[in-house]
Image (tube, rainbow, N blue to C red):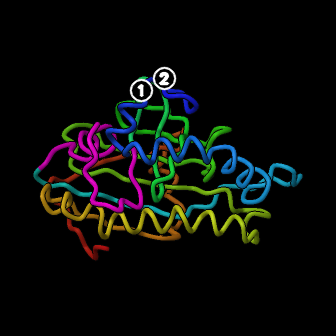
Amino acid sequence: MAFPWGGSLTHQQLATKFGWPTVIISAILLPILMLWSKLLAFPIWIPFKNGPFYMQKTTFFYSSNENVMMQKIYTGPSNLARFPAGWNCYADVEGKKFFEAFWGILQVLDLDATEDRFKLSSNWMTWLLVSIAFIDFPKPPVFENKVRIYFPLKGPNMINPFCWVTMAIGISGITWSGKYAFKPFYEKHGVTKIATKLPPDEEPQNVKSDGSFIYENVKKEPDYGSLS
């Protein structure tokens, strides 16, 4: 277990994925990040709930490399991103934790994993809160996956400037990782993507009872449309 975040990974495994500077600095900054998050960015002292807001949907296609995102990015032990990464992740399926780093600062979410989806939710050590996030996969063969992120913004957080500063750290990191840090990896493995900000709500018939996505008729070579 990597103190203070928990899970089944060791500090060495986290350092192999994210680098020792990220592990050390993140542990030192954790008390400050918690105070910032709980008192300012996502204040727990305001007696109003913030509902989930559908902020981002990204579909990744990898027509000739089956399951490459799961094997190399989500659960892969090596760092495949160029410096500076902006964003990177490591799914600890055994320990039920999802580690991610924004601009070299680590955070951890709870992970509920099944064969066709990762379901991510915030815990008390998450400084950039999500209401819920999904990484959805079709059943094998797997040549694409969807990432859907819902942030707690339907409420006072929508007009909280500290919340938006924190959100900007995460959104900028994810954007940079896709356009720069992981670009060589995407080109090497034939990964393309469609990213949609502020997507419409999913059609009810496409969503399971737990919120995960229902995949049907996945094609090996999809119509990519307009990529970003």
Depth check: give the residue in front, 90 or 154.
90
The label number, if any, that marks residue 10 in the structure image? 1
Instruction: Name the residue at the bottom extreme.
Output: 226
Residue that carries the numbered disc 2 in the rendered image: 1
What amino acid does circle 1 point to? Answer: Thr
**Screen quadrant of the C terminus:** bottom left
Expressed as whole percent of the image width and height from the top left, the position of residue 139 reads: 27, 38
Identify the residue at horizontal 57%, vertical 56% (top origin).
150
Residue occupying image coordinates x 49% and y 28%: 2
Instruction: Describe residue 105's horizontal placement relative to residue 9 as left or right.
Output: right
Specify the quadrant of the image occupied by residue 58.
Answer: bottom left
Q: Secondary structure at mark 1?
A: loop
CB contact under 8 Å: marks 1 and 2: yes
Q: Is residue 90 inside the magenta stretch?
A: no
Magenta range is: 65-89
Dot 2: within a 10 Å radius of its alpha carbon, few (fewer than 14), some, or many (20 or more) residues? few
Give the quadrant of residue 165. Answer: bottom right
Left or right: residue 148 compared with residue 58: right
Mark closer to the chain start, 1 or 2:
2
Q: For the residues marked 1 and 2, what is the alpha-carbon distance in whole angstroms?
A: 5 Å
Label 2 element class = loop
Is 52 rendered above or below residue 125?
Answer: below
Residue type (three-letter) at the residue carrying disc 2: Met
Q: Position of residue 56 (x, y in %)?
A: 49, 63
Left or right, 154 with reference to 169: right
Dominant secondary structure, magenta: loop
Residue at horizontal 72 percent and vertical 59 percent from the top: 41
Q: Position of residue 152 (x, y in %)?
A: 67, 56
